[in-house]
Image (cartoon, grey):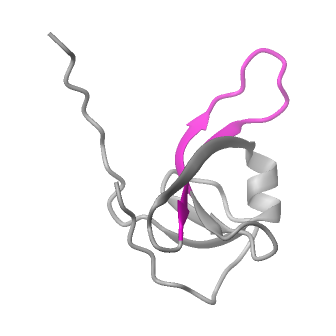
Amino acid sequence: MKVSIIPNTKSRRGDPVEVGNVYTNPHGRPHYKIVIGIIDIVNDRPWKNIALYKVFADGKCAGACCEPEKYLRDHQDLIGQVENMPELKVDWLK
C-alpha cells in the first residue's frame, strides 16, 4: 500500500482522536501517523490505546504501533484526515 501525502504547514492539537486522523511530530522521526483504530479501555487500564499506521513522506510504510489517546491528542500535531478510509476485506485460504 502507498499513501499520497502533500506537505502541510498548518497543524493543531487537542482535537478529538478519530479514525482517519493524520498526525506528525515536528521534533520526532520524519513520518506521519494515521489512526486506523481506537482500542477500548480494557480491565483497569486508565486510557484508550490508538492503533497507528506510520508512513514516510514518500508514502512508503514506516511501521505500526499503539499509543495512548491522551498522548496523541496533546503532544502530536493533527495535520489532516484521510478522505476515504479503506475497508480491508480478507479472502480466507481454502
In the rendered structure, does residue 49 fall within the stretch colored magenta?
yes
Residue 22 lies in quadrant: bottom right
Q: Name above or below for residue 20 compared with residue 68.
A: below
Q: In percent of the image, x 45 and y 62: which residue is there?
A: 60
Which residue is located at x 76 percent, y 76 percent? 26
Farthest residue, direction bottom: 9
Nearest the viewer among 87 and 1 is: 1
Task: Please provide percent x and percent y for residue 87.
Answer: 30, 43
Q: Is residue 73 magenta?
A: no
Visible in this render: residue 53?
A: no
Q: Is residue 20 left or right of residue 67?
A: left
Who is closer to the viewer here, 28 or 9?
28
Q: Which residues are magenta?
A: 34-56
Image quarter (top left, top right, bottom left or bottom right) of the N terminus: bottom left
Nearest the viewer among 46 and 92 is 92
Would residue 63 be found to the left or right of residue 3 on screen? Answer: right
